[in-house]
Amino acid sequence: MFAIIETGGKQYKVQVGDLVCVEKLDNEVNSVVEFNALMLEKNGKVTTGNPYVKNVKVKAEVVEHGKGDKIVVYKYKAKKNVRSKQGHRQPYTKVKITEIV
């Protein structure tokens, strides 16, 4: 059984026991988060929602908060001696899928 969830403007395919890094959530570590399911596959039968599947929630536990790898943003204008260099680390929340109800 798996489900497609949506959070942070992105969609993730999840199963029970998966560790998923999603966009940063404001929940505390070890708290429970519920996501709505866009699609559910159970015993070979696929159920899609409009936009969400009714009476289906995906429960997850917040494992940790962190930052991703650094990316370097470098901008320049040719022949103008204009340069700017900036680094960025995207924050994330790692969640563990506990159940699909």
Image: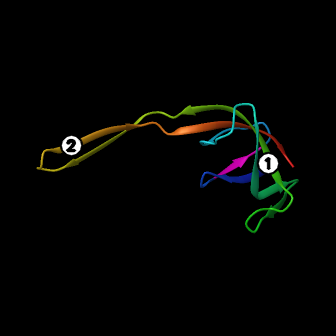
Total residue callouts? 2
Alpha carbon distance from label 1 to label 2: 46 Å
Task: State the image quarter where residue 19 is shown.
Answer: top right
Amino acid type, mark 2: Arg
- Dot 1 surroundings within 10 Å: few (below 14), some, or many (20 or more)? many
Q: Which mark is residue 83?
A: 2
**Which residue is found at the position 62% from the left and 37% from the top?**
93
SS at mark 1? Answer: strand
- Is residue 29 depicted above or below 36 in this figure? above
Q: Are marks 1 and 2 in contact (CB under 8 Å)?
A: no
Q: Which residue is mark 1?
A: 58
**Which residue is found at the position 47% from the left and 33% from the top?**
69
- Is residue 60 depicted above or below 44 in this figure? above
- Dot 2 surroundings within 10 Å: few (below 14), some, or many (20 or more)? few
* Residue 88 x/y as whole percent: 41, 38
Amino acid type, mark 1: Val
Q: Which mark is residue 77?
A: none
Seen from the viewer's position, the closer of residues 16 and 80 is 80
SS at mark 2? Answer: strand
- Is residue 12 depicted above or below 48 in this figure? above
The stretch of residues the image draws in magenta is 11-15
Q: Is residue 89 left or right of residue 42?
A: left
* Residue 17 x/y as whole percent: 78, 36
